[in-house]
Amino acid sequence: MNGGQDLGGAHGFGPVIPERNEPVFHSRWEERAFAVTLALGMLGRWNIDMSRYYRENRPPVEYLSSTYYELWLKGVERLAADRGLIAEQELKSGKALSSRDPALQVPDAALARKLLADMRGAKLAVPVVALFAPGERVRVKNLHPSTHTRMPRYCRGRTGVVAADHGVFVFPDTHAMGLGQKPQHCYSVRFSAQELWGAPRRDAVYIDLWDDYLEKA
Amino acid sequence: MAHDHDHGHDYDEEMGFRVAALERLLTEKGLVDPAALDELIDTYQHRVGPRNGARVVAKAWTDPDFKAWLLRDATAAIGSFGFAGRQGEHMIALENTASIHNMVVCTLCSCYPWPVLGLPPVWYKSAPYRSRAVSDPRGVLQEFGVRLASDVEVRVWDSTAEVRYLVVPRRPPGTEAWGEEQLANIVTRDAMIGVAEVQLERVT
């Protein structure tokens, strides 16, 4: 979606201001919002692409004026309701009306730790033919899906060179919408600063892009 | 996104109530175990952070075979330290040299290599960094105090997929006799994101 989250190349946000000796969390509610999000995710009712979609899928004004963990909290509240973990009425009232699905395996501390160490990730051991090869010139398709995508606006229609083939990965655009993994190759594609920004610098941006986003240039 | 520290006490109180209400509901329904929540927080508050990445970089600086392994298969090389799991399943290490400077961003959200760097700082997740890292990397680097010659190539890596990037900064001159542990002490988080250079002044 062309939403508030797609920030690459935007102007007007001012300088980057690092905080000295920054704590991991700035207040207790941030800790809890973080942990609740991870713990509920471990119940397997949604995937990481859905989580990202639920954080970005709100009016840009609201997205840009919310703090980071506020977006996490609002996202996980909606996911829990939409994916059937809690009822709307429960979210509204804060009172439990029924007990949980007994089939769910709710992680205790030991299981949570084990699941954090899980290395399965988004790479898939399925044979899919790569549509492009390192060294090949590719153009990013001029697509504007209104749903989740990991194709930043600033590279659409731009031409780059495949720098590496990462292998076969879950395709986030379908995965986020509950439409399956649609396994396909994901590549690191190199774009010159000249191509992206018209800037006569020798610099480059590398973007990870899937087969469905690309065409031969 | 809004700079998180611009928000005041009332905001934190309101958010606190909102999280507490959700956590109470989820606990009552048996959907979360509060001990698991404590474990998740403790992991990233106390056990997993940039000291992990610093150890990896220090080893790469002192052991050419390890460095070659790290640049060839970062996931396995980093895994040999026991640094693995969430947001580090598919790692790539990027070596800074005299002619190439790498820096990492996630313009679409906040993707970051948790097992080696922990959770990202606010500036990394903020609109100023996410918007300008790709279009004005030299301007951003200057704000961090890094000035690169025009013949150095800046490579910005936008973490749009599940691949996570760790920058191996340049080893500062004058550290030739140093051991791994001493070197690890000077490697900073920002240097491993690629917005700083490792400097000796930090320890003197």
Image (cartoon, grey):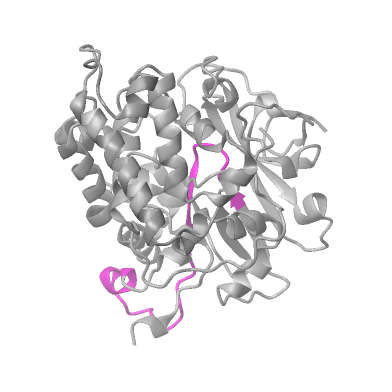
- B183 is higher (above) or lower (below) than B22: below
Comparing A68 with A66, the one in front is A66
Residue in view at x 28 percent, y 73 percent: B179
**Looking at the image, can residue B6 be seen?**
yes
Residue extending farthest to the front is A93
User: Which corner quadrant holds the N terminus of chain A?
Assistant: top right
Q: Where's residue A7, x and y in %?
A: 65, 48
Q: Where's residue B190, x and y in %?
A: 46, 65
Q: Is residue B182 magenta?
A: yes
Comparing B152 with B26, the one in front is B26
Q: Where's residue B110, x and y in %?
A: 50, 47
Comparing A42 with B59, the one in front is A42
- B62 is higher (above) or lower (below) than A9: below
- A17 is higher (above) or lower (below) than B19: below
Q: Is residue A191 left or right of residue B104?
A: right
Q: In which quarter of the view is residue A40 placed?
A: top left
Highlighted range, magenta: B157-184
**Looking at the image, can residue B158 be seen?**
no
Q: Where's residue A204, x and y in %?
A: 70, 55
- A96 is higher (above) or lower (below) than B46: above
User: Which corner quadrant holds the C terminus of chain A?
Assistant: top right
Residue in view at x 35 percent, y 36 percent: A37
Q: Is residue A44 magenta?
A: no
